[in-house]
Image (tube, rainbow, N blue to C red):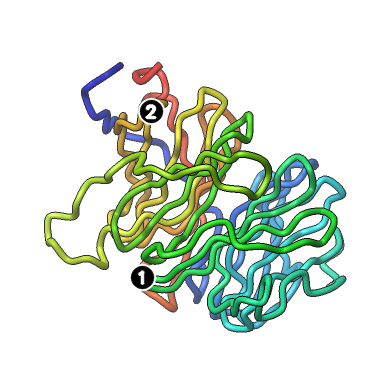
Amino acid sequence: MNDIIVTSPVERTVFFEGAFYTEGPVRDKLGRYYFTDLSGGRVWRMSPEGRSLKVWATSTCPNGQAITREGHHLICDSKEHVVKRFDAKGRLIRYEVNESCAGIPVHVPNDVIVDRSGGFYFTDSVREEGRVFYKSSAGNCHEVAQGYDYPNGLVLSTDERYLFIAESYRNRILRITLDKPGRMGYWEVWCDLPQHPSGTTGTNLPDGLAMDGMGRLWVAHYGMGAVQVVGTDGKLLASVATGLPLTSNVCLIDDITLLVTGGITEPGPGAVARINVRNITEKIR
């Protein structure tokens, strides 16, 4: 274990700058990128090299998204209180979650991830009583956990034994042990994240999550202008400066490249950037 926090310089390329704060970066099988712009009401598609850009779909306030095995997109709409399913051409198929799950009201669907069985997890981001839900491929919806202070980003471990959750207003990452898909055994605090020097709560909120092939967790740290890298033992390994003060989310393109979303303020302006982290990954192997 490397006890030194690595902060090497990184190569950064801005792919997109827009009027609205961005979220929900994903990559499809053809290497194309998708991201949302929340208050702008759009889901954008971008070519692999970042040159070609088009509005792929629209919604009221699209937030986190995930791509399913069949190439559909599940997209959280935080203002409509829904999770929508779009086909590969950006056409709305149906509402997977519509204002409630298992009879429980859903307030702010934020992030969503898909598991190998075709089911999906999503967060309901509210203060103190936030929840995580699961909907199976058979259509059964139930609550996984509740009582978190603004549960936000989600990611599964490679073997899908563990579900990691960014609990924003407690500035920490939680790890849930899953007895089976969508069923919690127990949860624990996996990592407490660095505090912003200002001491202001809104400047150190963990947001989107990603996991690499080594089992390391990459945490978009809203207000810190960084992506934090957490090792397999829950200890902080590195801090990657993103150039986006409000870093919202991170997508791993390959072993040395990140796609990050966020912006300067909310509701905007926002941006999407590609970051080469070779210097950092070489030091934390």
Rendered residue at 36%/62% (across/down): 246
Query: Is residue 2 left or right of 24 when viewed as pictured?
Result: left
Local crowd size for mark 1, using a 10 Å CA cut-off: few (<14), some (14–19), many (≥20) = some
Q: Residue at x 35, y 52 (%)?
A: 221
Q: Percent x, y for residue 204?
A: 27, 58
Dividing the image into 4 quarters, which one contains the N terminus? top left
How packed mark 2 is, by other alpha carbons closer than 10 Å (few <14, some 14-19, many 20 or more), is: many
- Label count reads 2
**Residue 265: percent from left, percent from top:** 36, 72
- Give the image location of residue 266, x and y in percent: 40, 76
Kindly identify the amino acid type of the residue bearing the numbered disc 2.
Gly
Q: Secondary structure at mark 2?
A: loop
Pinpoint residue 94: horizontal percent, then vertical percent.
Answer: 84, 73
Please determine whether, in this image, residue 56 is positioned above or below residue 173.
Answer: below
Number of the label disc, if any, that sits on residue 116: none
First in residue order: circle 2 vs circle 1: 1
CA distance separating discs 2 and 1? 27 Å
Marker disc for residue 128: 1
Left or right of 95 in this view: 225:
left
Residue sitting nearer the eye, 228 or 56: 228
In the picture, residue 93 is in which quadrant? bottom right
Q: Which residue ends up furthest to the left in the rendered image?
A: 198
Q: Quadrant of the C terminus?
A: top left
**Hey, what amino acid is under mark 1?**
Glu
Secondary structure beneath dot 1 equals loop
For disc 2, the marked residue is 231
* Residue at image point 47% right, 69% down: 125
Task: Name the residue nearer the viewer: 260 or 133.
Answer: 133
Q: Residue at coordinates 42% horizontally, 26% vertically from top-left?
A: 232
Would residue 73 appear left or right of 176 to someone viewing this image?
A: right
Q: Which label lies toward us, 2 or 1?
A: 1
The quadrant holding residue 2 is: top left
